[in-house]
Amino acid sequence: MEDGRCKLGLRAKHELVVLIESGESFRAAAAALKVSPATAHRWWHRWQSATAAQRASGECLTARRPIPASCPWALSDEAERAILHARATTNWGAMRLTWLTGRHRSTICKVLRRHGVSQRRRQPVRQTTKRYEWARAGALLHIDAFSIPKFDHPGHWATGDRSKHGRPGGLGKTVVIGVVDDHTRLAYCELHASENAANVSATLTRAAAWMRDQGCGAVEAVMSDNAKCYAISAVFRDALLRLGARHILTPPLHAPLERQDLCLRFAVSSGWAARLPAPAGLTQAEGVPRERVAPVRPGLRVPFDRLACVRFVGQWGAGGPAKLT
């Protein structure tokens, strides 16, 4: 390893030892090449201790790496292998490995950098969702709601005209309160004016009774978001007590768990409601047929492909649900 800034290069070192071999003193040879006598003495003794092959290749005149020949406090190979094994097994950082290996953080960093594993490895595929499913039909029910605006004329989806001329707004909205079975994806929906404790409790009670008529078992748990009509409502809590079910609240800002709303929006928006023109004065959801049944395919793993039925009941629950045929 030669430094380009060094004045005494490989050719100058060879000339230095040639002058000394020719009979020049160390001081005279050093003065000829403008170096110190100690430098001339060092390179001369390296030349004398080298073999013929090292002299021919010039290896004895090259600069050595600034690494000590021995270090009393250096880690043994076994200790370094223990650190590398802990890193490969856990993929932890240096700070967490201090607890596992008993070494200082700086020592672990040096060992990892020396072996080229200082950067933590990444997973091949990052997990963004957590799939889950209860094994028995009717054991877990998801309840959620979303609002759909009312309109009296078809919009640009049906007509292709995006101008709002002659299209009055402010007609209100209708709230779709839906209950979805976790195992069969059986959905029960009711249309209400608002999402309050009384409406969601009544919808849950009627949905549980209707799902029992379809062959589902007893309700063990109900999952909902953290809306006040679910989380702190005494009316909703009494409805759960009558059903004998416990309440599961999804963690805040945890979208992968809130899939009941996705099932409802898929069924209403993508499944049938967006494909059928609604009569005047009705919402999109009210334009859907009262009952639309798709064949049950429990062997599929995709929830939307296993959507069995979406049952819509009128604005105040009129008409009542009917059994599936």
Image (spheres, helix red, strand yellow):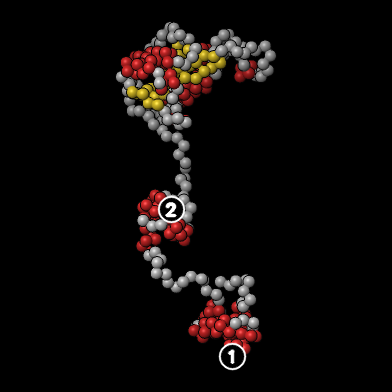
Residue 154 visible here: yes
* Quadrant in which the C terminus appears: top left
Disc 1 marks which amino acid?
Ser
Q: How many marks?
A: 2
Q: Position of residue 255 (x, y in %)?
A: 47, 30
Q: Secondary structure at mark 1?
A: loop
Seen in the picture, residue 24 relative to 296 is either above or below; the reply is below
Q: Are marks 1 and 2 in contact (CB under 8 Å)?
A: no
Q: Which corner quadrant of the image does residue 231 belong to? A: top left
Q: Which corner quadrant of the image does residue 222 belong to? A: top left
Q: Left or right of 52: which side holds 213?
A: left
| Chain-order first, disc 1 or disc 2 | 1
Seen in the picture, residue 55 relative to 148 is either above or below; the reply is below
Q: CA distance from mark 1 to mark 2?
A: 56 Å
- Farthest residue to the bottom: give it: 23
Tell which of 188 and 237 is nearer to you.
237
* Quadrant in which the N terminus appears: bottom right
Q: Residues within 10 Å of mark 1 (few under 14, many from 20)?
A: some
* Residue 197, numbered label: none
Tell which of 256 and 279 is nearer to you.
256
Q: Left or right of 46: which side holds 293?
A: left
- Image point (49%, 22%), residue name: 265
Residue 184 visible here: no
Q: Position of residue 293 (x, y in %)?
A: 43, 17
Q: Secondary structure at mark 2?
A: helix
Residue beneath label 1, please? 25
Q: Position of residue 131 (x, y in %)?
A: 41, 33
Residue beneath label 2, please? 94
Disc 2 marks which amino acid?
Ala
- Image point (45%, 22%), residue name: 227
